Every structure is written in structure tokens, then in C-alpha cells.
Amino acid sequence: MKNGSLQEILNDVSQGRRELEWLARHRISRGIASGLEYLYMYHRPRIIHRDIKPGNVLIDDDMEDRISDFGLAKVLYCLMVIHKSELRILILVLQSFGVLLAVLVMGKLPSDDFFQHTEEMSFVKWMRNVMNSANPNRAIDSKLLGNGYEEQMLLVLKIAYFCTLDDPKQRPNSRDVRYMFVSDSALIKDLDFFKMYKSITTSLVMNNLCS
């Protein structure tokens, strides 16, 4: 595709060779979320892409995203119940998606030298600490500040935060994530509310995966 992969675009942005405005980043984020929901919730047989990362997201001429490289995809047929190992794969994939979301908002990659010189020495831990600080805007790519979308950026970072929670059972599924993108809801704004929601709906999620 003309624009190559999201990884190539992010590299160009970090080196000052091109710009990627927030609305384009947000559209890409929502597009990937919708694609993952379709693959995991609606496509039959179920397809699990096990390597979600910027290099496996292609961007077309209209800056629309296309999930690519299904070499590591695993086709799952759900019988009476879903195996715990398969549910674990789904949860891990959404964790990777959370990292990708954070990359789009922060303008940094997990491999950047920046994180080797922080106290946390970890992309995810640094994001969490900043998000829990008095000034969470520090996590936002400085190139994006001042355009009036800071609140929306922080909401996307909260989705990334939820997707990378230490307890896999508390992470959202692909349907939760897509809903968060289209709804300015308590699911995004309140971590405790989200955890309560997940504890109630986990069994329903497993039933949906097997339907």
C-alpha cells in the first residue's frame, strides 16, 4: 500500500519526515478495534491474530488501516466451551492492542531508548505511572498538544491502560474496546467501575466466544 505500514509512518513521524495528526491516529485506532472485534466475535471460523503490532497494520491511500500478516493467526472452532488456553490468547492479543494504542497517543515505541533511562524501564509501567499522576498529559505526544483533543487522547490512553492491566481477567475483550471508542461512558472514566463490570460479564464473554 502507498503509505506502507503504521510502523513506517511512526518512524517517519518520530524523525520529523512527516506528520500524523490526532484525528488520523484516532481513526486508525478505531479501525483496528473494529477489525479485531469482527475477527474475534463475528467471523466464523474465529480468527485470532496473534501478532498485533504497528508493523502488521497497513495504511491505504485514504489513511484507513488494514490488519495484515496472518501468518501467526490461529483459526479456532468453538465447540461446547472455549478452552482456557484460547481465552488466554484472546486476552494477550488485546494486551498487544493496548500497547499499540499507547504508541499512537504517546508517539513513543516500547523499544525507544527513552524507556531505558526512566525509573520504570518499561513502556507500560511508565504509561501507568504518568496516567496516575497529577499531570497525565505528560504521556501525550508533544506534537499533538494544543489542538483541543487532549481529553479524547487521554480516554484512548485509558483504554490502553485497561488492555494492559496486570490481571488478565480484568482486561476488556474486543467488544468492550470497540464500545469504549464509541461511548463516552463510565467504562472508560472509572477504573473501579470497569473492574466491577468485568467481574460481572466474564462468563457472558466466554459464552459469546463460543456462540
Image: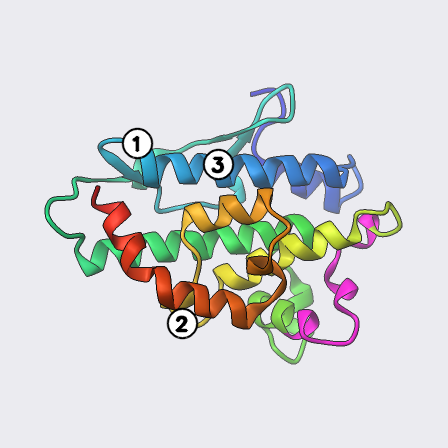
The residue closer to the viewer here, 121 or 156, is 156
Mark number for residue 167?
2
Secondary structure under tag 3 reads helix
Residue 107 visible in this rendered orientation of the protein: no
- Mark on residue 34? 3
State yes or no: residue 151 in magenta: no
Residue shown at the point (81%, 48%) measured from the top left: 144
User: Which part of the image, by quadrant, shows the N terminus?
Assistant: top right
Task: Name above or below for residue 44 compared with residue 120.
Answer: above
- Separation of residues labelled 3 and 2 (CA atoms): 24 Å
Horizontal side of residue 85 vs 162, given as left or right: left
Using the numbered discs, state the Cα–Cα distance from disc 3 to disc 1 in whole angstroms: 12 Å
Asked whether 82 or 166 is in front, the reply is 82
For the residues bearing labels 3 and 1, Cβ distance under 8 angstroms = no
Q: Which residues are magenta?
A: 129-144
Mark 3 or mark 2, earlier in chain: 3
- State the residue at coordinates (63%, 67%): 127
Mark 2, Cα crowd under 10 Å, few <14 / some 14-19 / many 20+, is: few
Identify which residue is drawn at 80% across, 41% down: 16
In this rendered view, identify the residue nearer to me: 190 or 78.
190
Q: Which numbered dot is residue 43? A: 1
Image quarter for residue 113? Answer: bottom right
